[in-house]
Image (cartoon, rainbow, N blue to C red):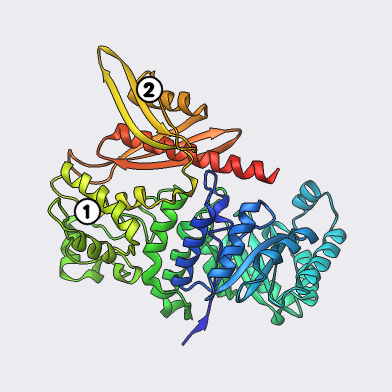
Amino acid sequence: MGEKIYIFDTTLRDGEQSAGVAFTPQEKLEIAKQLEKLGVDIIEAGFPCSTPGDLEAVQKISREVRGTTICALARAVTTDIDTAWEAIKNAADPRIHVFINTSDIQMAHQLNKDREQVLTQAEAMVRHAAKYTSNVEFSPMDATRADPRFVYEIVRRCIDAGATTVNIPDSVGYAIPEELGGLFRSIFENVPNIHKARVSFHGQNDLGLCTANTLTAIQNGARQVEVTINGIGERAGNTSLEEVVMALKTRKDYFGFETSINTREIYRASKMVETYSGMPVQWNKAVVGKNAFRHGSGIHQDGILKLRETWEIMDPAEIGIPQGTQLIMGKLSGRHAFKVHMEELGYELTDEELSRVFSAFKELADKKMEVDDRDLEAIVNENMRSMEDAAWRLELVQVSAGDHSTPTATLRLVDPEGNIRTDAATGTGPVDAVYRAMNRITGLSPRLTEFSVNSVTEGIDAQGDVTIRIEQDGRVYTGRAADTDIIVASAKAYMSALNRMLLVNKRDAVRN
């Protein structure tokens, strides 16, 4: 057995800071339960002082997810730490994560404080957190751009104040692997009490180096790594859990470390986060992308047919990706066969979810001769979204268009109170007409910043997968939907984005 690397998952905190992402409390709980099943050691469930909704979500996770450490983030401020403890005090193993800026640029321009003031504040706040629990993590934010001597001193003092985990963050994705390795080695050499704490690393992907940096940190003494599912997170994202875990597993001969991750749950976690975040996983994404285990080259196909290992260094079954001959589902397939096949794909549906997804499958099967696994995943993504944030519901889309007529759309929506609203609008095209009609009914008028349509499968009867992004008041919101009619898919995607925008606005109003 190799030495263990502890996996700290921050999908629900840093991952949610991705522009356009807003998990509901119920979605957060479902993701947390999947992370527990995945085997992560620590779940950073949120930033409780940010909104009442986040406080509620962290409290709920703390009560219901008992098989892992539940962590809450707090600035080095008394009220933040008190709120964090209120959120996690009922957890089986609660952790408070305290952070403060440590680079000269951030201390001067964000905190308006000098080094001594930051040292004093950090030490006092870690000591305050330690009054609640012995499980305290401290992060000197932007450490990779800070004076290393200052990092040594603040780490030393915070360990003496009660920090049992010290996280070294590359907060703006600035570090180069060789440089980062030197920083970690110097910390172990220059912080005399470093042996009293577990050392951690948190990477951002601004230069596309966070996985490489994370593995370098491990090689130079880090025994905890902070990651997210699918690598989602602020700006260019965080270190991807699946990439680090599978690198350690695939190249155990080189690294020699273990994790507690049940890798067969990776794919399901990836699809869940993709669905709830509204952020599609890029096709060529390592480990979980659609093309990660698909082979188009004839030479590769020939090798795979003879021996899978000729062109695959990982077994997709070990990640939970369905294997073997694909079972083609059609309109004659029964509910039981459908349920069994969905379980094989990694989806454990409740009776209510199964009914909703099976009904959508039957509708699609009437339109398509064959429904393959990609269609089924699109159906699940469309129909398993939590309805908690569905302020408006789409009931009818009717469009008239042509090269000698003005595109016109008629929509019927159900408002949050259950009232049916119908209106029509014209536009430069059918999709534009649909969006104008939806704006008229809802009274909302965000700016559409991105619109893309992709085919879920091949063929003329393929489903269209529509992803859109809208912007209002400097914030971006994502919507995604699939349907064999791309106009309907476009309407559903726009409705999804509007509902996410309304959810965020509602949270802001409660907060203020």
Image height of 409 relative to 267, above or below: above
Question: Which residue has dot 2 on it?
Answer: 433
Q: Residue at x 80, y 77 (%)?
A: 160
Front residue of 238 and 326: 326
Q: What kind of residue is marked 2? A: Ala
Percent position of residue 423, x then y? 40, 22
Q: Is residue 354 left or right of residue 507?
A: left
| Outermost residue toward the top in this view | 404
Front residue of 278 and 222: 278
> Dot 1: what SS?
loop
Q: Is residue 440 left or right of residue 335?
A: right
Percent position of residue 123, x then y? 82, 68
Query: Does residue 81 appear in the picture of this structure?
Result: yes
> Dot 2: what SS?
helix
Label 2 crowd bin: few (<14), some (14–19), many (20+), radius 10 Å? many
Q: Nearer the viewer, mark 1 or mark 2?
A: 2
Q: Which quadrant does the C terminus fall into?
A: top right
The mark nearer the N terminus, 1 or 2, is 1
Question: Which residue has dot 1 on it?
Answer: 296
